[in-house]
Image: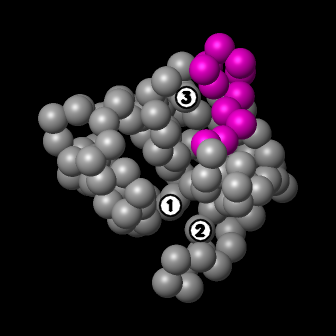
Amino acid sequence: MIYKILSSGEWEQAQAAGHFAGTAMDHQSGFIHLSAADQVVETAQRFFAGVTGLTVLAVDPDRLGDALRWEVSRGGALFPHLYAVLPVDAVVAAHPLPADRPAADAVAELLG
């Protein structure tokens, strides 16, 4: 699995549209930022500290085709980047994060 952290409102809009077109940061980069299981907690720490109303999507990379590329990013690690919209049917689970805990802690607990 690979993961996407987004606002719960963005996830609701994606479900209605049948796809997720990306966050403002994704649009700025030209691709949808995703994280591998061993990267998503740090992503939550770096970009979502103090943010509430979040959902973590578990995405099946096999459903994304050639639009998914693993590219060098933070610290020289390979990160999954999606150069297309994220179809809702590629999402195998959506986990709302509790608002009373830091996002990184909630994600770490979620992934066990």
Query: Compared to 46, does 64 lie above or below?
Result: above
| Tag 1: amino acid | Ala
From the viewer's side, name the closer residue of 81 and 28: 28
Residue 93 position in % (x across, y down)? 47, 31
Residue furthest to the left: 100
Q: Nearer the viewer, mark 2 or mark 3?
A: 3
| Tag 3: amino acid | Glu
Residue 60 position in % (x across, y down)? 61, 44
From the viewer's side, name the closer residue of 34 and 2: 34
Residue 98 position in % (x across, y down)? 23, 32
Residue 10 disc label: 3
Q: Which residue is mark 1?
A: 36
Does residue 29 appear anywhere in the picture? yes
Q: Which residue is mark 2?
A: 79
Left or right: where 106 falls relative to 70: left
Residue furthest to the top: 16
Residue 6 position in % (x across, y down)? 49, 39
| Tag 2: amino acid | Phe
Please check the rendered image and state whether residue 58 is part of the magenta-colored stretch, yes or no: no
Q: Residue at x 27, y 47 (%)?
A: 50
Callout 2 crowding tier (Cα within 10 Å): few <14, some 14–19, many ≥20: some
Q: Residue at x 37, y 63 (%)?
A: 46
Between disc 1 and disc 2, whose residue precedes? 1
Between disc 2 and disc 3, whose residue precedes? 3
Q: Marks 1/3: CA distance?
A: 20 Å
The residues colored magenta run 13-23
